[in-house]
Amino acid sequence: LRNATASALITRTDTPQSFGKARMLVPELTRQYDEAFQQFDVLVMPTMPFVATTLTAADAPIEEYVHSALNMLANTA
């Protein structure tokens, strides 16, 4: 699974050579996933490139809830 990051970085460049390199990694990446699924039923991986924000306390003022909600608008596209 370590190759997943390398594969993602390679595919970010838009050249035929980069695409070819990424395609050549597919069998190895598939093998690594198959190996991981021999041991685990689920693989949990981050979907965002940063740590999740903390939840607003239940007794927090409404302003804090609004600030927290408006802070995440970029993630609603």
Image (cartoon, rainbow, N blue to C red):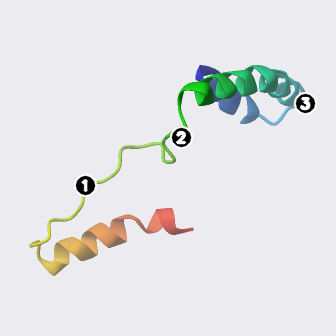
Q: Residue at 54% across / 26% down in the picture? A: 39
Q: Residue at 90% across / 30% down in the picture? A: 16
Q: Secondary structure at mark 1?
A: loop
Nearer mark to the viewer, of 3 and 2: 2
Quadrant containing the C terminus in the rendered view: bottom right
Nearer mark to the viewer, of 1 and 2: 2
Q: Position of residue 18 (x, y in %)?
A: 82, 27
Q: Please tell me which of labels 3 and 2 falls first in the chain.
A: 3
Circle 3 Cα neighbour tier, 10 Å, few/some/many (<14 / 14–19 / ≥20): few
Question: Disc 2 designates what residue?
Answer: 42
Q: Name the residue type under label 3.
A: Pro
Is 45 drawn above or below residue 10 in the view shown? below
Circle 1 Cα neighbour tier, 10 Å, few/some/many (<14 / 14–19 / ≥20): few
Query: In the figure, is residue 35 to the left or right of 68?
Result: right
Real-space CA distance between mark 1 and mark 3, rounded to the nearest whole angstrom: 42 Å
Nearer mark to the viewer, of 1 and 3: 1
Question: Disc 1 designates what residue?
Answer: 54
Q: Nearer the viewer, residue 9 or 38?
A: 38
Q: Nearer the viewer, residue 24 or 34?
A: 34
Quadrant containing the N terminus in the rendered view: top right
Q: Secondary structure at mark 3?
A: helix
Q: Give the number of the disc on residue 31.
A: none
Residue 69, located in which quarter of the rendered image?
A: bottom left
Real-space CA distance between mark 3 and mark 2, rounded to the nearest whole angstrom: 33 Å
Real-space CA distance between mark 1 and mark 2, rounded to the nearest whole angstrom: 25 Å
Q: Give the number of the disc on residue 16.
A: 3
Q: Residue at 18% across / 77% down in the picture? A: 63
Query: In the figure, is residue 1 to the left or right of 71?
Result: right
Q: Name the residue type under label 1.
A: Thr
Residue 33, located in which quarter of the rendered image?
A: top right
